[in-house]
Amino acid sequence: MPRIAFLAVSFLIALPCFGAESDALAIDAALQARHLPFGTVLDPIFAASDSDRITGYTRCGDSAIWTGHYLAAEAFRYKVTGSSDALDNVRAALAGIQLLVDVTGTDLLARCAVPVDSPYLPGIAQEEAHNGVYAGSINQQSYNWIGHTSRDEYVGVFFGLGVAHQMVNDAQVQASIESLATRMAAFLETNAWIAVMPDGAIGAEFLTRPDEQLALLQVARRVNSNRFSSAYKRLETEAPLAIAPVAVDVQDVHGSYFKFNLDYIGLYTLIGNESSFIPRLFYRAAYAVLRRATENHQNPHFNMIDRALTGANAGRDADTAAYLDQWLQRPRRDAYVDLTGTVASCSGGEACQPIPIGQRVPTDFLWQRDPFQLSGAGSGLIESAGIDYLLPYWMARYYGVIRE
């Protein structure tokens, strides 16, 4: 074989071959078929662990946050591939988020919304009763929607809106993003940054999380500068405080692990959209604290945000590709896992080291769950949507960590 041809073949063999696009497309096809019954992301419940018959839906309370993450994933996919399917999915995700804003009648973001004539509503309403079930109507279609909207839902949705605004240069998409971000931010601003339900009940409050409040305003002012630039500038004086809640979060790297996903996507939004030196310096200081506490958690989602914010790193990027490949070996349903006695455990009943990705407890979005957790999940009846693969995969394609 000629030397040049040999070197070319050797180079191709050396390239990482993790996470083929066909895997991402198959996951997306399953999500489209089974996880969007009412326009936003939910997880199906099957009749049995070996059945494909759907008997209900669950995790409605987090439908908004995962729809926001899915919007981000499809926005990256569209930027990478220019696929018309990806653009359709972006538009559909935005329509789903609009449903969650329209159905409340006040521009409050609902956790999820279900048509009142759906056979799945009784089960969902029972599961979400603690969050409050409210009535709404859109175009003569009656819905029940879930309230007590948390900061998680807002931060996830604004993360998706911010990514889509950057990645999808389409007039319809841009107009939809501007409208949604404006309506939701204006509602919170009017209500002193508290998510007030129609009956006066209180959901999210952002006064104790200036970092998250700034992240929402960061997106709002990017898509509607005339309306929100002044508000962001006024709050920007609190940029030095952004490090405080993150510093509290990292004191416990196991409890409420979902907080780290919110920290990562919030700081991605803040740093990635900030052009002023001083606030960016404070945001980066907060990010450094977060990254030091979690960089060894074998988390490709966090790794891809680190790639976006700090640039290429050969070791981290190779690990990210390998972790995504390991995700593909995981079951999609929530069979119970107990690794007690199988892996070394330390104080607090946690593993001493991050559990290999293929063995971790099944869940909705793996990268927001404690990687040291030894046991948990259900009966194998609930299927995850796979957004925990799609988002880091398409980010990895966009940043050149994985090449198709």
Image: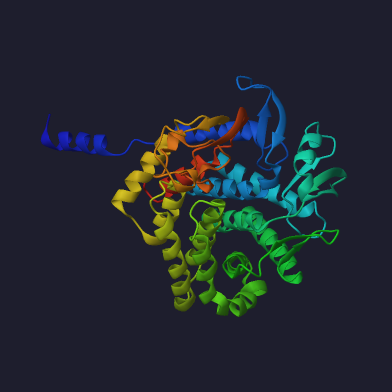
Residue 21 visible in image? no
Judged left or right of residue 271, residue 11 is: left
Question: Could you tell me which residue is drawn at 64 percent across and 46 percent down?
Answer: 93
Measured from the top left, where is residue 98 in percent x and y? 72, 52
Identify which residue, 80 or 305, lies in the foreground: 305
Identify which residue, 35 or 331, lies in the foreground: 331
Q: Residue furthest top?
A: 50
Measured from the top left, where is residue 397 in percent x and y? 42, 45
Q: In what quadrant of the picture does the N terminus appear?
A: top left
Judged left or right of residue 172, residue 326 is: left
Judged left or right of residue 253, residue 97 is: right
Q: Is residue 254 above or below residue 336?
A: below
Identify which residue, 281 or 248, lies in the foreground: 248
Question: Could you tell me which residue is drawn at 76 percent across and 38 percent down?
Answer: 124
Instruction: Determine which quarter of the picture holds residue 308.
Output: bottom left
Judged left or right of residue 35, residue 370 is: left
Residue 68 visible in image? yes
Measured from the top left, where is residue 8 in percent x and y? 20, 37
Q: Residue furthest right?
A: 140
Measured from the top left, where is residue 203 in percent x and y? 74, 59
Instruction: Determine which quarter of the picture holds residue 214.
Output: bottom right
Instruction: Determine which quarter of the picture holds residue 351.
Output: top left
Question: Could you tell me which residue is drawn at 40 percent across and 60 percent down?
Answer: 292
Q: Is residue 74 above or below residue 248?
A: above
Q: In what quadrant of the picture does the C terminus appear?
A: top left
